[in-house]
Amino acid sequence: MRCAMPLLAALAACSPPFDWREVRVDEATLRAQFPCRPERRVREVPIEGTPLRMEMVTCSTEGITFAASHFAVRDPAGVSAAIDAVKAALVANLGGAAPKTSAFQLAGMTPNPSTARLEVTGRRPDGEAVDLHTAFFTRGLRIYQLSVLGKAPPPQVVDTFFAGLVFR
């Protein structure tokens, strides 16, 4: 057993902190590159006063949390309002100022005026300062959110995560 300990320690030291792998985000279409082994979670969230089932794939490594979530709305006319409600709640939860907003495009997404990429600086409930990089986009009635949350996550890590999205 003594011989195994140094070997295990050496293997752990050699393992990269960002071990990218393709992960299925939803039932059939969206794939993302995650830098760690994600867990799946499901919860009911109130969106515009209606409880909706949100599914999430998430993992954390090097103090950075990576997440991809999605939910479906029932009414096509409510897609933009639902995205805007989630954006507002997200900024409010972090106590962040107005987010820096930019365009977001993904081949296969449904065009929507509320589609965007946001950068928000805020605080966790314990007061720790964090940066959030997130994107909202749709495909049909399904709304997706991709997020990277941490204390100054490296830009190349954020860009790799966002560039790894693909509809298949």
Image (spheres, rainbow, N blue to C red):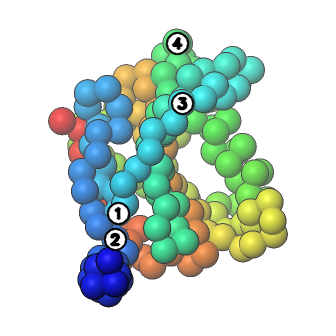
Which quarter of the rendering shows the C terminus?
top left
The answer to which of 148 and 75 lies nearer the viewer is 148
Spatial CA distance of label 2 from label 4 is: 37 Å
Q: Residues within 10 Å of mark 4 (few under 14, many from 20)?
A: few
| Amino acid marked by disc 1 | Pro
Q: CA distance from mark 1 to mark 2?
A: 5 Å
Mark identifier at residue 42: 3
| Residue 2, position as x, y percentages in the image | 34, 84
Judge whether 104 appears above or below 151 on screen: above
- Residue in the image at 34% along x and 63% along y: 35
How far separated are the C-alphas under marks 1 and 3?
A: 21 Å
Residue 103, percent from left and from top: 43, 55
Q: Which comes sooner in the sequence, label 4 or label 3?
A: 3
How many neighbours does mark 2 have within 10 angstroms: few (below 14), some (14-19), or many (20 or more)? few
Type of the residue with mark 2: Phe
Q: Is any part of residue 18 visible from this angle?
A: yes
Residue under circle 4? 74
Toward the viewer: 148 or 141?
148
Residue at the disc numbered 1: 35
Going by the numbered disc 3, the residue's amino acid type is: Val
Residue 7 percent location from the top left of the image? 27, 83
Q: Report the residue marked by disc 2.
A: 18
The secondary structure type at the circle numbered 2 is loop
Q: If you read the primary sequence from the N terminus, does the residue marked by circle 4 or circle 1 appear first? A: 1
Residue 88: x and y in percent read 70, 44
- Residue at image point 60% right, 21% down: 52
Q: Secondary structure at mark 3?
A: strand
Which class describes the residues within 10 Å of circle 3: few (<14), some (14-19), or many (20+)? few
Whether residue 148 can be seen here = no
Pointer 4 with pointer 1, Cβ within 8 A = no
